[in-house]
Image: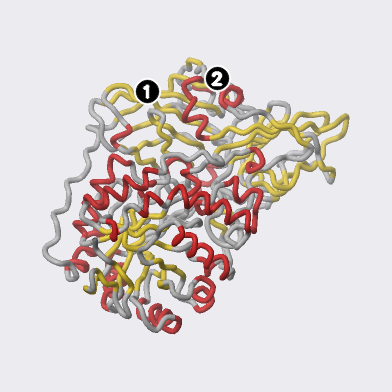
Amino acid sequence: MAGFVVGDGDFLLDGRPVRLLSGALHYFRVHEGQWGHRLATLRAMGLNCVETYVPWNLHERVPGGFADVEAVGRFLDAVAAAGMWAIVRPGPYICAEWENGGLPHWVTGPLGRRVRTDDAEFMGQVERWFRRLLPQVVARQIDRGGPVVLVQAENEYGSYGSDRAYLRRVVGLLHACGVTVPLFTSDGPEDHMLTGGSVPGVLATANFGSGAREAFAVLRRHRPSGPLMCTEFWCGWFEHWGAERAVRDPGDAADALREVLECGASVNIYMAHGGSNFGGWAGANRSGGLHEGALRGTVTSYDYDAPVDEAGLPTEKFRRFREVLARYAEGPLPEVPAPPVRIGGAVAAAVDGWAPLAEVLEVLGDEEVAAPVPPTFEELGVDRGLVRYRVDVPGPRRPYPLSVSGLRDVAVVTVDGVRAGVLAAEEAVLADPVAGPAVVELWVESLGRVTYGPRLAEPKGITGGVRHERQYLHGFRARGLRLDAVGEGGGKVAFRAVQPRAADAPAEGGGDDGSGAAAARSGGAGAARPWGGDAEGTGAVGPPGGPGPGGAGGGAPGLYRAVAEIAAPGDAALELPGWTRGFVWVNGFCLGRYWSAGPQQSLFVPGPVLHAGSNEVWVLELERGGEGVRLG
């Protein structure tokens, strides 16, 4: 079998110097039926290697409940079939703009800041996970005839911590689980990051998007010998809800890539093909230089302005990169594969069924929990989805401000069954005072757990409390609605037949769309802060009012159904005109979150999800719904 080792200045394959021309393609962001096409496209761009993370929380959503860990092995087999090498980055933390940086909520919930340290309980969970996962990798190492040439230990640890004992434990555990190919670390090209994230005897690499010569000079100060490698060459960037599009000029990116290669380095283009954050797995970031500011949820598309776009199509950046990479290829590059088939034409599907959110919760929700204070998502076992909190305001008493502390992240509030507003700030105050007695419901949605920085592992839900004037309210009833439960059991919901709503009729409860989305679209007070509250800092968004079931659900929150008739399956874009914020399933496959805040305007639908004939679309709308969807 082949031997792949780290030499003094190069990677060596059976003693021969080789350069890794790698590209990131995450198996979990691409439908399995399209892996082959995407890999062939990257090979045609001039790559000889593919890198993927492995998200722990995707494969172990509840303790011990492992789900399709074998997908890792199947992907590595597809890489081998494409004639490429593989780099595997198993974490346990991965960042990747993925929910909670890949860490399970049931780990970070009880452990908090103890994660990513040499904590006995955390490392016990990591070892149990690695011993379940790593056989998929070990059996496919290059010294066993497989494609895997490198495995990463942790991920960008120097941006987070300085626990050298923890890093040594991760390295030792990887070896104990049978990893024999070289290990490596990757960090930003800054002294404190490299000193915090590197391990003696393990290859250190750097992550950056430009300035290769300067970055590698910093790396060489720490590691005078060994192959140079940029593990994440950022050729684009990810996007946040309510922000501008992230675009990098193709020529500028190609010049930066050329500089990396002129330094004699290996490279991993991040991302070569980004794919999609299916299933509502998109994470979030905190704004600011130290990542401690306002929450910014990541959009469902992980297009990343990559050379191969979200739909698998080569871009101008692909052409420019191919020209650069061709100079370093061993022989002529393969032909670019034909584009994937798309559906024949635009298809409109009107809503024909609706169920109120409360009824959906009754059928598909977890057991209700009673507690003096509001339990967090983690305490309720909710990873992705929403929680209904119900609490009584004692009375009689005159109206006082109702405030929420530690809100993560968005709450639709009703008082005695009538919508009173939407709160979207950690410290939020309802626009209108509330008198007692009253029953208050807060439907709280997580916009994604933090993926990077010091706020990693923070809980979701109402993490502080609810106050009436200065008085904390106690005696909560909380019930979770997990996205997985909707996808698995949506067919159990009894949909009510609906009639189309008049074009000029707003949802009952008035205003624009009842959420402040019109202000966001027109550049008003809500435009810059879809997650940060109103301009006055109350955290209240949108007018008060109560949703009613007239028309197509009256636009009220709930689960909507539409049926799209397709002549032949193929890739498509799903548009939701007039909808506000929620999640979409097509034939039971969760495409992810949509939000009128933008910048993403449609959701990618992989062709293998569709079939000829009737295709059922479910839309879980959390504010105000539309009348139909479009596939095109």
Indicate the position of residue 110 as horizontal and vertical percent values: 66, 49
Indicate the position of residue 584 as horizontal and vertical percent values: 44, 34
Judged from the image, the secondary structure of the residue bearing numbered disc 2 is helix
Q: Which residue is mark 2?
A: 550
Quadrant showing the C terminus: top left
Residue 563, numbered circle: 1
In this picture, is 54 found above or below 554? below
Discs 2/1, front = 1
Indicate the position of residue 314 as horizontal and vertical percent values: 24, 53
The disc, 2 or 1, on the residue closer to the chain's N-terminal end is: 2
Indicate the position of residue 67 as horizontal and vertical percent values: 45, 39
Question: Residue at point 56% right, 65% down?
Answer: 166
Tell which residue pokes out farthest to the top in this image.
497
Horizontal side of 36 relative to 300 (left or right) equals left
Residue kind at label 1, given as amino acid type: Val
Residue kind at label 2, given as amino acid type: Gly
How many other residues sit within 10 Å of disc 1, few (<14), some (14-19) or many (≥20)?
Answer: many
Judged from the image, the secondary structure of the residue bearing numbered disc 1 is strand
Horizontal side of 121 relative to 209 (left or right) equals right
Residue 278, numbered circle: none
The image quadrant of residue 361 is: top right
In this picture, is 384 found above or below 425? above
Horizontal side of 401 relative to 557 (left or right) equals right
Question: Residue at point 59% right, 37% down?
Answer: 386
The number of discs equals 2
Residue 593 visible, this angle = no
Quadrant showing the N terminus: bottom left
In this rendered view, identify the residue nearer to me: 419 or 270. 270
